[in-house]
Amino acid sequence: MPEAATHEAHFESLERQKMAARLGTWVFLASELLLFAGLLALYASGRASHPEAFRYGVAHAMVWAGTVNTFVLLTSSFCIARAVHALRADRRRLAGALTGLTLVLAVAFLALKGYEYHHHLAHGQVPGGRSAYFVEHAELTGLPAFFTLYWITTGTHAVHVTVGAAVLAFFGLSIVRGRLRAPRAHRLEMAALYWHLVDAIWIFLWPMYYLMK
């Protein structure tokens, strides 16, 4: 059955419920920013302590992969933003298609990231610095720190992408089945806000680990 434009019993109105949802989402996003702010601070400290090693690590990154994934995420942000506008206008088919396209782009990002991880593992660029690769580059004492941070930071981001993809899949199915319509479009809007945060964080990670040679 289509979802009625009613509010939950513990809210005075649907508008008040939407406001509470938005506030809760922003508080959650702020906590996520604190997590990544700590990781960015560790990167800044490591780069200040071992500039040569960090420059070497960035210089040997898969720049094309990071750049392609940047465009993938930016395109996905545009798609989910348009999906929210389409759902508000009660254009369910368009909203469902755009949400589905965003999900496809999320999977593409993870697939390319998985390929990149496989490349690093094949070359011994593992977290912790316990491989022959680091023995060969023993003069770069900060190289283990660089790759450990790389794996932790991009891995944490990949987990967030995975969670976001699961949320988008849920809402996409809800739209297609007619359970999510214009009166409750704020639910998709909250998922879109989370997705925009994931994209914004990657905009910082891209230069840090791929461009700052």
Image (spheres, rainbow, N blue to C red):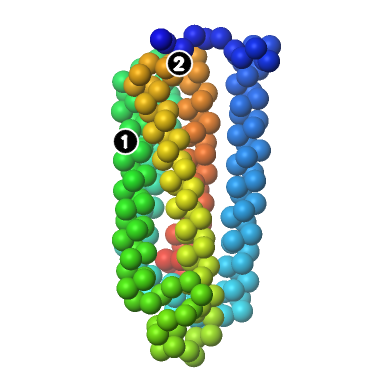
Q: CA distance from mark 1 to mark 2?
A: 20 Å
User: Of 195 and 122, which appears nearest the observer?
Assistant: 122
The amino acid at mark 2 is Ala
Work out whether residue 67 can be spotted: no
Expressed as whole percent of the image width and height from the top left, the position of residue 42 reads: 61, 67
Q: Residue at x 47, y 59 (%)?
A: 154
Q: How many marks?
A: 2
Expressed as whole percent of the image width and height from the top left, the position of residue 29 reads: 60, 42
* Image quadrant occupied by the C terminus: bottom left
Q: Quadrant of residue 103?
A: top left
In the image, 21: left or right of 119? right
Q: Quadrant of residue 170?
A: top left
Query: Label 2's element?
Result: helix
Expressed as whole percent of the image width and height from the top left, the position of residue 150 reads: 48, 66
Residue, disc 2? 182
- Mark drawn on residue 101: 1
Q: Residue at x 53, y 31 (%)?
A: 190
Query: Label 1's element?
Result: helix
Q: Earlier in the sequence, mark 1 or mark 2?
A: 1
The amino acid at mark 1 is Leu
Work out whether residue 10 can be spotted: yes
